[in-house]
Image: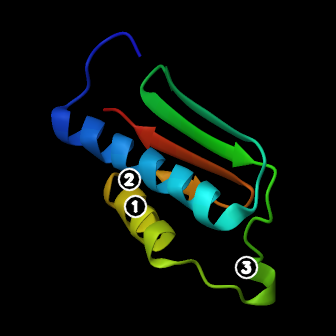
């Protein structure tokens, strides 16, 4: 990211990445994790990926409060999110 974003958006991004990394540490049983935040055009992409157990939503596993809060925040920012052993978030910047 070459220019500063709106302060509220920057704080939201920081908190989302922070919560995702806490999930990796506390729940994923992972030995490795990758985090990437990048801007391409008018969109911001966030990736947090690990080699842990992930979420099995097909088996009815519910997301915890932290990830549910992130999902709600992403929706409020008109973005999209996919979660598993890889969480990808796309946020429009317009």
Mark closest to the chain's N terminus, 3 or 1? 3
Q: Which residue is mark 3?
A: 57
Label tally? 3
Q: Up-down: is 79 above or below 35?
A: below
Q: Which residue is mark 1?
A: 75
Residue furthest left in the image: 7
Mark closest to the chain's N terminus, 2 or 3? 3
Q: Up-down: is 46 above or below 78?
A: above
Q: Which residue is mark 2?
A: 78
Q: Dot 3: what SS?
A: helix
Q: Residue 9 lies in what quarter of the image?
A: top left
Given residues 77 and 35, the one toward you in this image is 35
**Looking at the image, can residue 68 be seen?**
yes
State left or right for residue 46 relative to residue 77: right
Given residues 84 and 41, the one toward you in this image is 84
Instruction: Say few, some or many: other residues with alpha carbon within 10 Å of mark 3 (under 14 / 14 to 19 / 20 or more).
Output: few
Q: Up-down: is 24 above or below 6?
A: below
**Looking at the image, can residue 82 be seen?**
no
Q: Dot 2: what SS?
A: loop
Return the x and y of residue 25 as percentages of the image width and height: 61, 56
Work out how far the residue at label 1 is from the one at label 2, CA to CA, in angstroms: 5 Å
Return the x and y of residue 84 as percentages of the image width and height: 72, 61
State left or right for residue 44 relative to residue 81: left
Return the x and y of residue 93 as percentages of the image width and height: 35, 33
Residue at x 38%, y 53% (from the top left corner):
78
Work out how far the residue at label 3 is from the one at label 1, CA to CA, in angstroms: 19 Å
Q: Residue 26 lies in what quarter of the image?
A: bottom right
Q: Nearer the viewer, mark 3 or mark 1?
A: 3
Instruction: Say few, some or many: other residues with alpha carbon within 10 Å of mark 2 (under 14 / 14 to 19 / 20 or more).
Output: few
């Amino acid at each position: 990211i070459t220019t500063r974003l709106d302060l509220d958006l920057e704080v939201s991004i920081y908190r989302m990445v922070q919560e995702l990394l806490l999930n990796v540490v506390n729940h994923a049983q992972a030995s490795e994790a990758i985090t990437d935040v990048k801007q391409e055009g008018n969109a911001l992409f966030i990736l947090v990926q690990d080699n842990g157990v992930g979420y099995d939503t097909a088996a009815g596993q519910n997301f915890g409060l932290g990830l549910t809060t992130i999902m709600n925040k992403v929706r409020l920012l008109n973005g999209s999110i996919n979660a598993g052993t890889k969480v990808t978030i796309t946020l429009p910047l317009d």
